[in-house]
Protein backbone atom coordinates (compact mmCIF):
# COMPACT_ATOMS: atom_id res chain seq x y z
CA UNK A 1 0.00 0.00 0.00
CA UNK A 2 0.99 3.64 -0.29
CA UNK A 3 1.49 3.90 3.46
CA UNK A 4 3.99 1.04 3.40
CA UNK A 5 5.76 2.66 0.45
CA UNK A 6 6.13 5.95 2.35
CA UNK A 7 7.38 4.09 5.43
CA UNK A 8 9.87 2.21 3.27
CA UNK A 9 11.20 5.42 1.73
CA UNK A 10 11.52 6.98 5.17
CA UNK A 11 13.43 3.95 6.45
CA UNK A 12 15.72 4.02 3.42
CA UNK A 13 16.48 7.66 4.21
CA UNK A 14 17.50 6.65 7.72
CA UNK A 15 14.31 7.51 9.63
CA UNK A 16 12.47 5.37 12.12
CA UNK A 17 9.11 6.11 13.65
CA UNK A 18 10.39 7.45 16.99
CA UNK A 19 11.21 11.07 17.69
CA UNK A 20 14.87 10.10 18.18
CA UNK A 21 15.34 9.08 14.58
CA UNK A 22 17.46 12.19 13.99
CA UNK A 23 20.48 11.74 16.25
CA UNK A 24 22.20 14.98 17.23
CA UNK A 25 25.41 15.57 15.26
CA UNK A 26 28.54 14.91 17.27
CA UNK A 27 30.39 18.10 18.15
CA UNK A 28 34.13 18.29 17.69
CA UNK A 29 36.23 18.04 20.83
CA UNK A 30 37.50 21.61 20.76
CA UNK A 31 39.16 23.84 23.30
CA UNK A 32 38.98 27.60 23.58
CA UNK A 33 41.55 29.43 21.47
CA UNK A 34 42.44 31.41 24.59
CA UNK A 35 43.77 28.19 26.12
CA UNK A 36 45.67 27.10 23.02
CA UNK A 37 47.31 30.40 22.12
CA UNK A 38 48.80 33.36 23.96
CA UNK A 39 46.00 35.89 23.40
CA UNK A 40 44.50 38.69 25.57
CA UNK A 41 41.83 37.81 28.11
CA UNK A 42 39.90 40.98 27.27
CA UNK A 43 39.25 42.76 24.00
CA UNK A 44 37.40 41.63 20.89
CA UNK A 45 36.09 38.08 20.73
CA UNK A 46 33.65 36.32 18.43
CA UNK A 47 30.65 34.15 19.25
CA UNK A 48 31.13 30.70 17.73
CA UNK A 49 27.90 29.36 19.25
CA UNK A 50 24.50 30.94 19.78
CA UNK A 51 24.23 32.09 23.38
CA UNK A 52 22.63 34.67 25.70
CA UNK A 53 23.74 37.89 27.37
CA UNK A 54 22.50 38.14 30.96
CA UNK A 55 22.19 41.07 33.29
CA UNK A 56 24.52 39.68 35.93
CA UNK A 57 27.34 37.21 36.31
CA UNK A 58 24.97 34.50 37.53
CA UNK A 59 23.59 32.09 34.93
CA UNK A 60 20.21 32.57 36.61
CA UNK A 61 20.13 36.35 36.15
CA UNK A 62 17.73 38.04 33.74
CA UNK A 63 18.42 37.56 30.02
CA UNK A 64 19.29 40.85 28.29
CA UNK A 65 19.75 39.82 24.65
CA UNK A 66 20.42 36.92 22.35
CA UNK A 67 23.99 36.64 21.10
CA UNK A 68 24.00 34.95 17.67
CA UNK A 69 26.85 32.93 16.24
CA UNK A 70 29.32 35.03 14.25
CA UNK A 71 28.76 38.25 16.22
CA UNK A 72 31.77 40.20 17.48
CA UNK A 73 31.84 40.68 21.26
CA UNK A 74 33.85 43.19 23.28
CA UNK A 75 35.05 41.64 26.56
CA UNK A 76 35.81 43.90 29.51
CA UNK A 77 36.47 41.40 32.30
CA UNK A 78 36.66 37.66 32.90
CA UNK A 79 35.79 35.61 35.96
CA UNK A 80 36.18 31.88 35.44
CA UNK A 81 34.26 31.05 32.31
CA UNK A 82 32.00 34.12 32.63
CA UNK A 83 32.87 37.43 30.95
CA UNK A 84 31.51 40.94 31.25
CA UNK A 85 30.88 42.62 27.88
CA UNK A 86 29.73 46.01 26.56
CA UNK A 87 29.11 45.05 22.92
CA UNK A 88 26.80 44.06 21.22
CA UNK A 89 24.95 44.41 24.55
CA UNK A 90 25.99 45.19 28.10
CA UNK A 91 25.95 42.27 30.50
CA UNK A 92 27.53 38.90 31.14
CA UNK A 93 27.94 35.80 29.00
CA UNK A 94 30.07 32.63 28.92
CA UNK A 95 33.33 32.28 27.06
CA UNK A 96 32.98 28.48 27.14
CA UNK A 97 30.51 25.83 28.22
CA UNK A 98 30.73 23.81 31.44
CA UNK A 99 32.49 21.00 29.52
CA UNK A 100 35.03 23.38 27.93
CA UNK A 101 33.46 23.84 24.51
CA UNK A 102 34.20 27.35 23.15
CA UNK A 103 31.36 29.87 22.97
CA UNK A 104 33.49 32.99 22.50
CA UNK A 105 36.89 32.93 20.82
CA UNK A 106 39.46 35.70 20.45
CA UNK A 107 39.20 37.54 17.12
CA UNK A 108 40.40 41.11 17.63
CA UNK A 109 42.30 41.34 14.31
CA UNK A 110 39.18 40.63 12.26
CA UNK A 111 37.04 42.92 14.44
CA UNK A 112 39.48 45.78 13.82
CA UNK A 113 40.12 44.88 10.13
CA UNK A 114 43.76 43.95 10.58
CA UNK A 115 45.68 41.82 8.09
CA UNK A 116 45.87 38.46 9.87
CA UNK A 117 48.86 37.40 7.76
CA UNK A 118 50.87 40.26 9.21
CA UNK A 119 50.30 39.02 12.78
CA UNK A 120 52.73 37.04 14.86
CA UNK A 121 52.26 33.29 14.74
CA UNK A 122 50.27 32.84 17.97
CA UNK A 123 47.75 35.56 17.11
CA UNK A 124 47.33 34.38 13.51
CA UNK A 125 46.86 30.78 14.69
CA UNK A 126 44.21 31.91 17.20
CA UNK A 127 42.25 33.76 14.49
CA UNK A 128 42.45 30.83 12.09
CA UNK A 129 41.28 28.50 14.87
CA UNK A 130 38.32 30.82 15.52
CA UNK A 131 37.39 30.79 11.83
CA UNK A 132 37.57 26.99 11.69
CA UNK A 133 35.41 26.48 14.79
CA UNK A 134 32.87 29.01 13.52
CA UNK A 135 32.65 27.17 10.18
CA UNK A 136 32.13 23.82 11.92
CA UNK A 137 29.43 25.17 14.22
CA UNK A 138 27.65 26.98 11.36
CA UNK A 139 27.66 23.77 9.31
CA UNK A 140 26.29 21.86 12.30
CA UNK A 141 23.52 24.41 12.80
CA UNK A 142 22.55 24.07 9.13
CA UNK A 143 22.45 20.26 9.45
CA UNK A 144 20.14 20.54 12.45
CA UNK A 145 17.80 22.89 10.57
CA UNK A 146 17.83 20.65 7.49
CA UNK A 147 17.08 17.58 9.64
CA UNK A 148 14.16 19.38 11.30
CA UNK A 149 12.76 20.44 7.95
CA UNK A 150 13.11 16.93 6.53
CA UNK A 151 11.52 15.45 9.66
CA UNK A 152 8.56 17.80 9.25
CA UNK A 153 8.18 16.79 5.60
CA UNK A 154 8.33 13.05 6.37
CA UNK A 155 5.86 13.43 9.25
CA UNK A 156 3.43 15.31 7.02
CA UNK A 157 3.77 12.73 4.26
CA UNK A 158 3.16 9.88 6.70
CA UNK A 159 0.17 11.68 8.18
CA UNK A 160 -1.37 12.28 4.77
CA UNK A 161 -0.73 8.68 3.70
CA UNK A 162 -2.24 7.25 6.88
CA UNK A 163 -5.34 9.45 6.62
CA UNK A 164 -5.90 8.64 2.95
CA UNK A 165 -5.48 12.28 1.93
CA UNK A 166 -2.36 11.54 -0.10
CA UNK A 167 -4.07 8.76 -2.05
CA UNK A 168 -7.04 11.02 -2.80
CA UNK A 169 -4.72 13.83 -3.92
CA UNK A 170 -2.89 11.51 -6.31
CA UNK A 171 -6.13 10.10 -7.73
CA UNK A 172 -7.58 13.59 -8.21
CA UNK A 173 -4.41 14.80 -9.85
CA UNK A 174 -4.54 12.16 -12.58
CA UNK A 175 -7.99 12.95 -13.95
CA UNK A 176 -8.44 13.17 -17.72
CA UNK A 177 -9.12 16.90 -17.36
CA UNK A 178 -5.76 17.51 -15.66
CA UNK A 179 -3.88 15.32 -18.16
CA UNK A 180 -5.40 17.28 -21.05
CA UNK A 181 -4.52 20.57 -19.35
CA UNK A 182 -0.88 19.44 -19.04
CA UNK A 183 -0.83 18.39 -22.70
CA UNK A 184 -2.19 21.79 -23.74
CA UNK A 185 0.49 23.60 -21.73
CA UNK A 186 3.23 21.46 -23.29
CA UNK A 187 1.89 22.07 -26.80
CA UNK A 188 1.67 25.83 -26.14
CA UNK A 189 5.22 25.84 -24.81
CA UNK A 190 6.56 23.98 -27.83
CA UNK A 191 4.71 26.35 -30.17
CA UNK A 192 6.23 29.36 -28.33
CA UNK A 193 9.73 27.93 -28.71
CA UNK A 194 9.11 27.22 -32.39
CA UNK A 195 7.86 30.78 -33.00
CA UNK A 196 10.78 32.39 -31.17
CA UNK A 197 13.26 30.14 -32.96
CA UNK A 198 11.83 31.15 -36.32
CA UNK A 199 12.04 34.88 -35.48
CA UNK A 200 15.58 34.61 -34.09
CA UNK A 201 16.86 32.65 -37.08
CA UNK A 202 15.14 35.08 -39.45
CA UNK A 203 16.87 38.00 -37.78
CA UNK A 204 20.25 36.27 -37.82
CA UNK A 205 19.93 35.18 -41.45
CA UNK A 206 19.30 38.81 -42.47
CA UNK A 207 22.25 39.92 -40.30
CA UNK A 208 19.80 41.80 -38.05
CA UNK A 209 20.89 40.95 -34.53
CA UNK A 210 18.62 43.65 -33.07
CA UNK A 211 15.52 41.93 -34.46
CA UNK A 212 16.72 38.62 -33.01
CA UNK A 213 17.30 40.18 -29.59
CA UNK A 214 13.86 41.81 -29.66
CA UNK A 215 12.26 38.45 -30.40
CA UNK A 216 14.04 36.98 -27.37
CA UNK A 217 12.97 39.83 -25.06
CA UNK A 218 9.32 39.49 -26.14
CA UNK A 219 9.30 35.72 -25.79
CA UNK A 220 7.69 33.78 -22.90
CA UNK A 221 10.68 31.47 -22.59
CA UNK A 222 11.84 32.68 -19.21
CA UNK A 223 15.43 33.47 -18.11
CA UNK A 224 17.00 30.14 -19.09
CA UNK A 225 15.43 29.92 -22.55
CA UNK A 226 16.14 33.57 -23.22
CA UNK A 227 19.77 33.13 -22.14
CA UNK A 228 20.20 30.22 -24.56
CA UNK A 229 19.06 32.26 -27.54
CA UNK A 230 20.91 35.32 -26.23
CA UNK A 231 24.18 33.36 -26.18
CA UNK A 232 23.58 32.30 -29.78
CA UNK A 233 22.96 35.89 -30.87
CA UNK A 234 26.06 37.11 -29.01
CA UNK A 235 28.17 34.44 -30.70
CA UNK A 236 26.87 35.40 -34.14
CA UNK A 237 27.55 39.10 -33.46
CA UNK A 238 31.29 38.45 -33.17
CA UNK A 239 31.47 36.05 -36.13
CA UNK A 240 33.60 35.79 -38.17
CA UNK A 241 36.51 36.39 -35.77
CA UNK A 242 38.98 39.13 -36.53
CA UNK A 243 42.03 38.19 -38.52
CA UNK A 244 44.83 36.90 -36.35
CA UNK A 245 42.41 35.99 -33.54
Image (cartoon, rainbow, N blue to C red):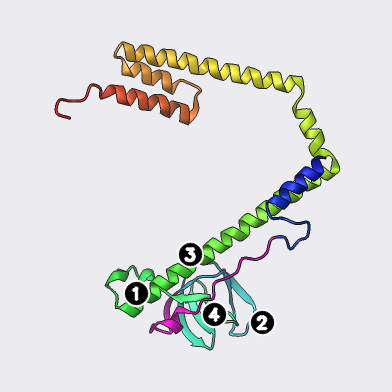
Q: Is residue 172 visible?
A: yes
Residue extending furthest bottom? 79
Identify the element where label 4 is drawn. loop
Q: CA distance from mark 1 to mark 2?
A: 36 Å
Look at discs 4 and 3 and give the one toward the viewer. 3
The mark found on residue 124 in the picture is 1
Task: Look at the image and tell me in which quarter the N terminus lies.
Answer: top right
**Where 104 falls versus 207 (above or below)?**
below
Left or right: 216, with 91 as reference point: left
Q: CA distance from mark 4 to mark 3?
A: 17 Å
* Foreground label between 4 and 2: 4
Residue 96: which disc? 4
Label at residue 60? 2
Secondary structure found at label 1: helix
Cβ–Cβ under 8 Å for marks 4 and 3: no
Are the residues at dot 3 and dot 2 in contact (C-beta closer than 8 Å)?
Answer: no
Instruction: Specify start and end residues of the magenta stretch as a single range.
Output: 22-45
The reply to whether discs 4 and 2 touch (Cβ–Cβ < 8 Å) is no
Q: Earlier in the sequence, mark 4 or mark 3?
A: 4
Q: Is 49 situated above or below 9? A: below
Can you see residue 71?
Answer: no
Q: Position of residue 132 (x, y in %)?
A: 45, 68
Residue 135 numbered tag: 3
Compare residues 39 and 63 and report the one nearer the observer.
Answer: 39
Magenta-highlighted stretch: main secondary structure?
loop
Question: Disc 4 and disc 2: Cα gap in Å?
Answer: 16 Å
Q: Is residue 146 left or right of residue 119?
A: right
* Secondary structure under the numbered disc 3 in the rendered image: helix
Measured in 3D between alpha carbons, the distance from the residue under mark 4 to the one under mark 1, in whole angstroms, is 21 Å
Q: For the residues carrying marks 1 and 2, which lies nearer the camera in this image?
A: 1
- Which mark is in front, 3 or 2? 3
Depth check, front residue: 74 or 178: 178
Amino acid sequence: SLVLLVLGLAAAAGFGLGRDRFPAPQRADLQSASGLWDVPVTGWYRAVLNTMVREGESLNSTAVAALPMGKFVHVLQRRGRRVKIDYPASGWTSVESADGEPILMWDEPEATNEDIWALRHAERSAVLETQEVLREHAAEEKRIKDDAQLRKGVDLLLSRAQSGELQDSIRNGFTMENVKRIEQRLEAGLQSVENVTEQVMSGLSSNNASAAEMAIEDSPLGPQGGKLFGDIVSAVKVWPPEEGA
